[in-house]
Image (spheres, grey):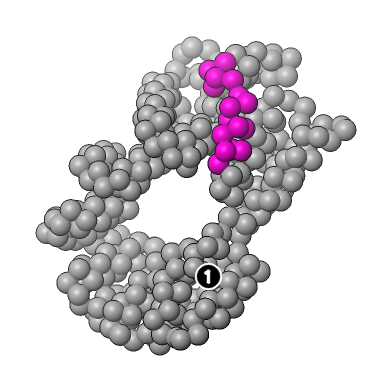
Amino acid sequence: MTESQPADEIPTRTTITDPLTNAFGSLNDLAPDLASLQDLATRGSWRSVLDKVSRARTASVSLLTQPHHHLTYLSYNTLALMKLRRFDEAAQELDSLEDFDSSSYKYESYPHIYPNRTGSMVPFALRWLYVVVPVKLGNRQEGLDRFYMLLGFVRDKLRQKGEANLEVSVNCWKKREIFVINCLIGLHLSNKEFTVCLNLINELISLDALDPISLSKLGYIQMQIGDLEGAKTSFNRVEEISKEGDVDVGFRNLVNRNKALMYLVGKDYVSAVREYEECIERDYTDFVAINNKALCLMYLRDLSDSIKVMENALERVPTVALNETLVVNLCSMYELAYVNHSEIKRTLSSWIAKVAPDDFDSSCTRI
């Protein structure tokens, strides 16, 4: 999604048109054959994304006839390279760009192509990739600096859209603000910088005091620093909110998973299993509950059932349950349960190769 606004808007709040209410009718209206590219990305076919972008760039009659077409396809190409852990190549793609504030990336620089648009044509996804790739390359501080710059950029946009009473745009930029803050929390959490994490999560809660996800994350961080009473208070607040109206299955499962974590800390694995089973009964694709139920069974020394839980999930909903964490845990259980675990893991690895998306890290089987 681009960040433009109509060029002919009159500078009075009552007549300003929100650019996001004039969205393109379809993905293919935004860029040629973009729906197909998006479908490949959704299915995790990242090598096919690279191939499609390459063919579009080198075709004798180019599909990419407008400046924003090139930026859109470059975004998909960079994302695909990152997903495939080809971080150096992703960085080279980003290095090929000019500064994002360059006039080359402004709609008004091409009035013959975009007669009624102004602003930046740089996709937000591309700005995010510019921030993330240095982290993936091991340049954590550079990535961290860029993350905070991106957060400042988003907040500036949010203020501008708010002052212009552009409600649809404001909602979009609010989501981006929350997304960037959550990325920062994850980055700081990976380095055990808990004080910063608490500050950031409290910023999220200040934006929406009734958000169960943010409150639950607060509880998770409190658990990691040993503040079990604080975590219990946060989780209780989530449960109270769930009782204030009709809530969906995801919300109810969140409440059960929070309860299960408190039981886990107290080593009451039987009660934790009960909570996770409630989640799975409501939603058999809840892979967090599946994974954690299996771990609790393993802690109860019931390796046979813990393995069955994992294997049944992989067989029943492979597209959901197949993630590296679950596979690592399953392989650990194989190593504990079977003498011939290497052969069993090779069988698992062969099956994964047939069904996994391109970015799945097959090394998690530890063969």
Badge 1 amino acid: Ile
Q: In this orientation, does residue 315 appear?
A: no
User: Is residue 112 or residue 116 the one in the foreground?
Assistant: 112
Look at 45% across and 27% down and name the residue there: 166
Q: Position of residue 317 (x, y in %)?
A: 54, 72
User: Is residue 334 or residue 206 the one in the foreground?
Assistant: 334
Which image quarter: residue 76? top right
Q: Secondary structure at mark 1?
A: loop
Which image quarter: residue 346? bottom right
Look at 41% across and 21% down and name the residue there: 160
Decide if residue 227 is on the left or right side of residue 353.
left
Residue linked to disc 1: 367
Q: Position of residue 320 (x, y in %)?
A: 52, 66
Look at 35% across and 46% down and name the residue there: 186
Q: Residues within 10 Å of mark 1 (few under 14, many from 20)?
A: few
User: Is residue 195 or residue 106 the one in the foreground?
Assistant: 195
Q: Position of residue 277 (x, y in %)?
A: 35, 78
User: Is residue 55 or residue 210 the one in the foreground?
Assistant: 55
Q: Is residue 23 above or below residue 216?
A: above
Quadrant (top left, top right, bottom left, bottom right) of the N terminus: top right
Q: For residue 21: magenta?
A: no
Q: Is residue 205 above or below residue 250?
A: above
Q: For residue 98: magenta?
A: yes
Q: In this orientation, does residue 335 appear?
A: yes
Decide if residue 127 is on the left or right side of residue 151.
right
Give the tally of numbered discs.
1
Q: Position of residue 273 (x, y in %)?
A: 30, 78
Look at 58% across and 27% down and name the residue there: 95
Please state the extent of the stretch shown in magenta in the rendering. 87-102
